[in-house]
Image (cartoon, rainbow, N blue to C red):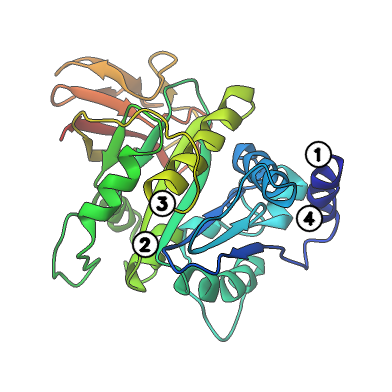
Amino acid sequence: MDAGNELLRRAAVNPQVLQWHTWAALKPGPSLVVLGAVHGNETCGAYAILRAIDDLQHGRLLLRRGRLTLVPVANPLAFGQRTREGERNLNRRFMPRDDARDYEDHITRQLAPVLASHEALLDLHSFHTPGEPFAMVGPRNNEGTREPFMRAQEESELARALGVNQIVEGWLDVYDRASRARGKPLDDEGIGTTEYMRSQGGYAVTIECGQHDDPAAIRVAEHAIRGALALLGMADVPAPPRFSGPAARLQDVVLRESAADQLAREWNSFDVVRAGDLIARRADGREVRAAYDGSVLFPYPEAAVGQEWFYLAVPG
């Protein structure tokens, strides 16, 4: 893996260059793209992809059909800084534009055609606080204007094949509410890699593999890659256990209003709350309580003012 580590080192010291690796089998089949380090401090995907690259290069993993593209570091600037963002959040406005205004715009302009040339996307992430890994899917089939989509069944099957025991849906609807609360337009706001992939006719799953620096998150990411390859019949690899339970549906997002706002305790994703439970306190003493039975997701105690502090989900 020394060569792989050198690949990551080069990504960190030369953020003006993107690297991806593509294998194309002579037998036709599905096309899959896998992203790591869309957020620079979420490194589990980068290391898992490195291991997949090493396995493919040394024959321990053989592509039987289709086309596979692996992008270990999607945001080299943020990766080199060990920060979530380079100049802004790549995964909140992933729409190519001719007049690139920041670093992430340049990244998007290069990566968007790569995504659009594939059928399926697996985007590997991690989270701040302890919690169980989970997969995130997009909308159900619809002909609406915000995120029209007709491949929900394929997306659900992919999410269930990745080896995690939780699935979450409904992210964009809830994020739109947060954008309105911030007074921001909804045109490109909230469009990340998975939303862009769906807009191009593909389907996509984000997998949150665990806490940022937990070595177990790398194993979750590795299992997810192999689960996707097994499901799509692209490689002869053992498939992780399939998840057969219900999804959780995001219901609300709560923004941090002041740096003095405090969570009531150390919440982890999927911690259960009952209607009336105290979740947080505002700087002025106001209490934030659960309005219904559900669970906490994505708690971020150090969220910037005006940013997502935590989400609430209900059984789907």
Determine the secondary structure under disc 3. Answer: loop
Q: Residue at x 36, y 62 (%)?
A: 195
Is there a contact, CB below 8 Å, between mark 4 and mark 3?
Answer: no
The residue singled out by tag 2 in the image is: 195
Determine the secondary structure under disc 2. Answer: helix
Image coordinates of residue 26 in percent, x first then y, are: 55, 69
Q: Amino acid at mark 4?
A: Ala
The residue singled out by tag 4 in the image is: 11
Q: Residue furthest bottom?
A: 98
Q: Residue at x 14, y 19 (%)?
A: 275
Q: Quadrant of the C terminus?
A: top left
Determine the secondary structure under disc 4. Answer: helix
- Other residues around mark 1 within 10 Å, as few (<14) / some (14–19) / many (≥20): few
Q: Nearer the viewer, mark 2 or mark 3?
A: 3
Q: Amino acid at mark 1?
A: Met
The mark nearer the N terminus, 1 or 3, is 1
Tell me the number on the disc at residue 1. Answer: 1
**Spatial separation of the CA atoms under disc 1 and disc 4:** 15 Å
Determine the secondary structure under disc 1. Answer: loop
154 versus 167 height, above or below = below
Q: Nearer the viewer, mark 1 or mark 3?
A: 3
The residue singled out by tag 3 in the image is: 233
The mark nearer the N terminus, 1 or 4, is 1
